[in-house]
Amino acid sequence: MNAVIESLTTACKTENGVLALINVDNFALFNEVYGTEIGDKIIQKCIQVIDKVTEGDDIKAGLGGDEFVIFAKDLKDKGELIAMTAYINEKLAYYITDLVGADNTVSLGVSTGAVFVPEFGDNYEDLFHKADKALATAKQLGNHGCSFYEPSPMDREMVYDIGKITEKLDEDSELHGAMWLDSVYFGIVYRYIRRYISTYGEDAAKMLITLNLTADNIGEEHFHQIVKEFGKVIVASLRRSDVVFQSRSNQFFLLFPKMTEEYIDMMTTRIKKKFREAGLDDVMTMDINYELIVSKREDELQ
């Protein structure tokens, strides 16, 4: 890895081009739903596709886990990198369908953050930071896209009305039950909770609920509609601080901040009771698996 950093440092000093960071969106969530073996295959596919879309003398390397860095020499057109990102996402989409099926609902793809060299500097560490800022922008815009570093105007002054912002963001106080999020927002919340528990030492838990059809007189479309409706029952059974994501057409991924094993047992009993009361045990089975997320505080690890 040191040799790669040295090559990148030299390239930033002596070459024209683009320094880009490529990150796999929602990869941690995908791993949780489908397992690390499938996740490893995704990373290998990313490496293959990135190698295919870059030139032979470009510098490219994995940064560990779900992130990659490339220095594309003499690349001057933003459209080329945008097209490269779109191509990677297209190939990943086909590959993911082959691996896990067409009903995958984890929004997996890549986002790219880039900075032009030497237009915005020639120091690798500084340029890396700028590319990382551009990557954050790409993710804020909804993932699976490409953003380029632009300096913020020094004379721009933004004035915030805290009261109005709070009013817009506050939930209706009458709402009950867990938050139901799509894959993009669930992935953001999931990463935040993992970071929170590692910082403050709080325990959390994750749960996977899988429903499988057993009755012959119910079609697939009707079954999926029943599953979605039961998802609303799950949401109503949980706390407002809990989060629910329908990870597949017959599966729900639940995230519980500040959770004890005793409370998990109570939640499991409650959901099973609702399942029976709805008469769903006559037409389908329900499997519930959970795992506590236990983390030590960062200051305890020093």
Image (cartoon, rainbow, N blue to C red):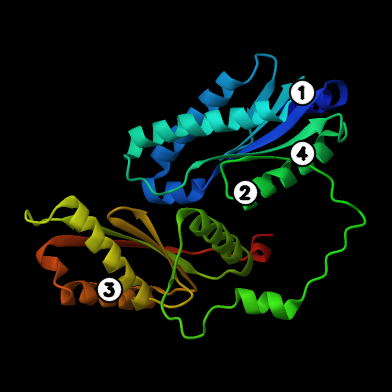
**Label 1 to label 4: alpha-carbon separation:** 14 Å
Residue type at tag 2: Lys
In the rendering, at what x and y percent does residue 16 appear?
A: 82, 22
Residue at label 4?
A: 128
* Res 7 label: 1
Residue type at tag 1: Ser
Mark 1 or mark 2: which is in front?
2
Residue at label 3?
A: 271
Residue type at tag 4: Phe
Residue type at tag 3: Ile
* Res 196 label: none
Secondary structure of the residue carrying numbered label 1: helix
Mark 2 or mark 3: which is in front?
2
Secondary structure of the residue carrying numbered label 4: helix
* Res 139 label: 2
Where is 94 relative to 295, above or below? Answer: above
* 2 or 3: tag closer to the N-terminus: 2
Q: How many marks?
A: 4
> Is 58 left or right of 31, judged from the image as shown?
right
Where is 119 relative to 261, above or below? Answer: above
Placement of the N terminus among the 4 image quadrants: top right
Q: Quadrant of residue 256?
A: bottom left
Placement of the C terminus among the 4 image quadrants: bottom right
**Label 2 to label 3: alpha-carbon separation:** 34 Å
